[in-house]
């Protein structure tokens, strides 16, 4: 594997999943694979799970890790080709990414969307800038439109806990007080489409995901109907794609409750975290045995490890 920015970078999904499960069983099986190699983790935005789990995964492989919060501690970067840089941007991604690539064998990048300029966000200007100019493999730590390390951990978790070969998996929109990216739901849908699951997406009207993700996906606008017989409920808020970046609804009726979970097939509750209690999901659900959010977060380590392992194994000098 060269880069890991979307599911399309995975040539053999079942092999990657098997590798992730193996990393979970025996985290130190390849503890020298990454020796004398450095992973750079570049954050334009806040993170807890992605930062710590990816760092831990790299350590399990013997890698060194450099972390930089470029969003708050670095020079402001320009991404526009041909820009006349007379504003507040001190450096172009062409130099910045190329320099970082001199210091690290692999770079991880987190960069949220603007939620203002849909075209720029969906063109993945930041992630593509790094892919084009760093000269080393790039791992997405959540980009403007995708969060593939999260989706891989989610899929691992579903595989671990499913009670039938083709579980019903429901992605439900839930309310939130802030406008959030579509990256997590986009990615979840993208990965579930290639997995062996029955996927249903439920959200209020106006929250349809971008066509490249929603194409071929079953949408049920009645949340209760979607929940019926579900094995996994995956809750997430996102802002509107159509009316780009706006909050169209804060309807508390969409919060995930015990009452709604009772409609499922003893369904498990999933969320990528961080989650706002009693806004997205009520305490009773998160505090119940049906909640698997901590296992899901734990699986971020083996998921990241499997990805780093695949990239390390295909470095030119490996
Ligand atoms: C981010 C999002 O919704 O994309 C990160 C989730 C992993 N969430 C928040 O900003 C709350
Ligand atoms: N789920 C997730 O990516 O969490 P962080 O934003 O804390 O990394």
Image: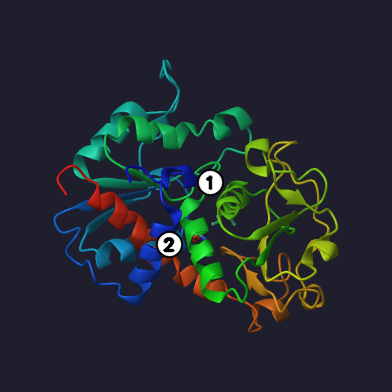
Q: CA distance from mark 1 to mark 2?
A: 19 Å
Q: Quadrant of residue 78?
A: top left
Please tell me whether mark 1 sits on a helix, a strand or a loop: loop
Query: Residue 238 placed where, x, y %?
Result: 67, 50
Most foreground residue, 24 or 36: 24
Whether residue 52 is visible to the viewer of this picture, yes or no, is no
Task: Please determine whether, in this image, residue 45 is positioned above or below residue 175.
Answer: above
Left/right placement of residue 201 relative to residue 118 reads right
Q: Residue at x 70, y 39 (%)?
A: 241
Most foreground residue, 15 or 34: 15
Please tell me whether mark 2 sits on a helix, a strand or a loop: helix
- Name the front one of labels 1 and 2: 2
Q: Residue at x 80, y 55 (%)?
A: 250
Query: Residue 45 placed where, x, y %?
Result: 47, 49
Left/right placement of residue 131 relative to residue 255 reads left
Q: Earlier in the sequence, mark 1 or mark 2?
A: 2
Left/right placement of residue 43 relative to residue 271 reads left
Farthest-out residue, front: 165
Q: Is mark 2 within 8 Å of ligand 2?
A: no
Query: Residue 82 placed where, x, y %?
Result: 41, 15
Task: Please determine whether, in this image, residue 127 is positioned above or below residue 178.
Answer: above
Total labels drawn: 2
Query: Residue 130 placed where, x, y %?
Result: 36, 35
Report the residue marked by disc 2. 17
Residue 124 is labelled as none
Report the residue marked by disc 1. 146
């Amino acid at each position: 594997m060269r880069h890991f920015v979307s599911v399309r970078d995975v040539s053999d999904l079942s092999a990657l999943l098997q590798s992730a499960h193996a990393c979970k069983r025996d985290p130190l099986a390849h503890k020298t694979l990454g020796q004398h190699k450095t992973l750079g983790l570049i954050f334009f935005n806040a993170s807890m799970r992605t930062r710590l789990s990816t760092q831990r995964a790299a350590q399990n492989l013997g890698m060194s890790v450099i972390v930089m919060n470029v969003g708050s501690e670095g020079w402001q970067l320009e991404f526009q080709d041909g820009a006349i840089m007379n504003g507040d941007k001190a450096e172009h991604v062409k130099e910045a990414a190329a320099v970082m690539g001199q210091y690290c064998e692999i770079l991880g990048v987190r960069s949220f969307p603007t939620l203002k300029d849909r075209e720029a966000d969906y063109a993945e200007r930041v992630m593509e800038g790094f892919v084009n100019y760093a000269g080393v493999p790039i791992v997405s730590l959540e980009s403007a439109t995708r969060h593939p390390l999260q989706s891989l951990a989610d899929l691992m978790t579903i595989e671990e806990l499913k009670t039938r070969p083709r579980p019903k998996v429901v992605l439900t929109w839930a309310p939130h007080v802030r406008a959030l990216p579509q990256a997590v739901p986009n990615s979840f849908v993208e990965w579930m489409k290639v997995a062996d699951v029955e996927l249903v997406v439920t959200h209020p009207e106006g929250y349809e995901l971008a066509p490249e993700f929603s194409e071929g996906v079953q949408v049920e606008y009645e949340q209760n109907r979607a929940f019926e017989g579900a094995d996994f409920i995956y809750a997430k808020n996102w802002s509107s794609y159509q009316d780009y970046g706006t909050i169209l609804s804060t309807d508390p009726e969409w919060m995930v409750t015990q009452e709604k979970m009772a409609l499922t097939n003893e369904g498990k509750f999933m969320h990528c975290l961080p989650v706002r209690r009693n806004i997205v999901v009520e305490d009773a659900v998160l505090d119940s045995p049906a909640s698997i959010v901590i296992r899901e977060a734990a699986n971020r380590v083996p998921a990241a490890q499997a990805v780093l392992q695949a990239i390390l194994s295909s470095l030119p000098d490996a």
